[in-house]
Image (cartoon, rainbow, N blue to C red):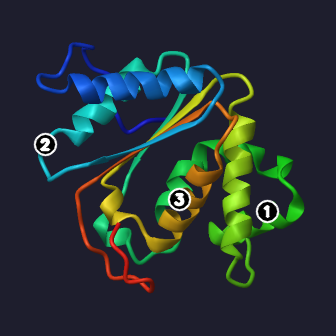
Amino acid sequence: MSKFTVGPQGRLWGRIDQLDALDQLLDTARSGKSAVLVLRGEAGIGKTALLEYAAGRAVGFRTIGVAGVESEMELPFATLQLVCAPMMGRLQELPEPQSNALSVAFGLREGATPNRFLVGLAVLGLLASTTEDHPLVCLIDDAQWLDEGSIEVLSFVARRLKAEPVALVAASIPTRRASGRGGVR
């Protein structure tokens, strides 16, 4: 289920380059290869409208649409759980270490803090298994509010998607985030 509504497919004024990039991203996923795009810009410039455009153009895709929430930034894997929720029926298809790591990360079973590498591999496996019949588009709005665990795992996944028909689009305002690495996202 997507948080984005599919509206009229008219062009957005002054956004031809961005719309073409989104269309190309979807075409790449339709052809069986992955594509990742990050939309950055100040609040109110239309990033959500671009995500809605992508949702509307993703005919024949499975669509997952989520948004980061500021109040959940301190909850490990909060946004990742929303991304994976529609795919959790495939959890048993994963290798046991990955399935266990994801189950612990999402509070489905007790255990020590899961290895993020295994969580990342599990999410990668879920995405791949979900695309057997249809390509997948994952739209993430307000990515500046993602918790650190979700950012790390989704970044890991984005770097490793290769020959899967998955399009991943994240929208974020430019922000500095205090992290253990002191970096800028």
Quadrant assignment for the C terminus: bottom left
Residue carrying label 3? 155
In the rendered image, residue 108, in percent from the top left (x then y), is placed at 69, 66
Find residue 87 and report its horizontal and vertical position in percent: 66, 43
Mark 2 Cα-neighbour bin, 10 Å: few <14, some 14–19, many ≥20: few
Judged from the image, the secondary structure of the residue bearing numbered disc 2 is loop
Q: Are marks 2 and 3 in contact (CB under 8 Å)?
A: no
Label 1 and label 2: CA atoms lie apart by: 39 Å
**For this view, does 125 lie left or right of residue 79?**
right
Nearer to us in this view, 57 or 184: 184
Q: Is residue 166 left or right of residue 90?
A: left
* Residue at image point 51% right, 53% down: 82
Say which residue label 1 marks.
Answer: 98
The residue pinned by badge 2 equals: 45
Image quarter of residue 73? bottom left
What amino acid type is highlighted by mark number 1? Gln
How many C-alpha atoms fall within 10 Å of the one at disc 3: few (<14), some, or many (≥20)? few
Q: Are marks 1 and 2 in contact (CB under 8 Å)?
A: no
Q: Residue at x 23, y 57 (%)?
A: 173
Secondary structure state at the residue bearing disc 3: helix
Q: Closer to the camera: disc 3 or disc 1?
A: 3
**For this view, does 9 lie left or right of residue 26?**
left
Tag count: 3
Mark 3 belongs to which amino acid? Ser
Relative side of 107 to 64, left or right: right
The amino acid beneath tag 2 is Ile
Tell me the distance, in whole angstroms, between the alpha carbons under discs 3 and 1. Answer: 17 Å
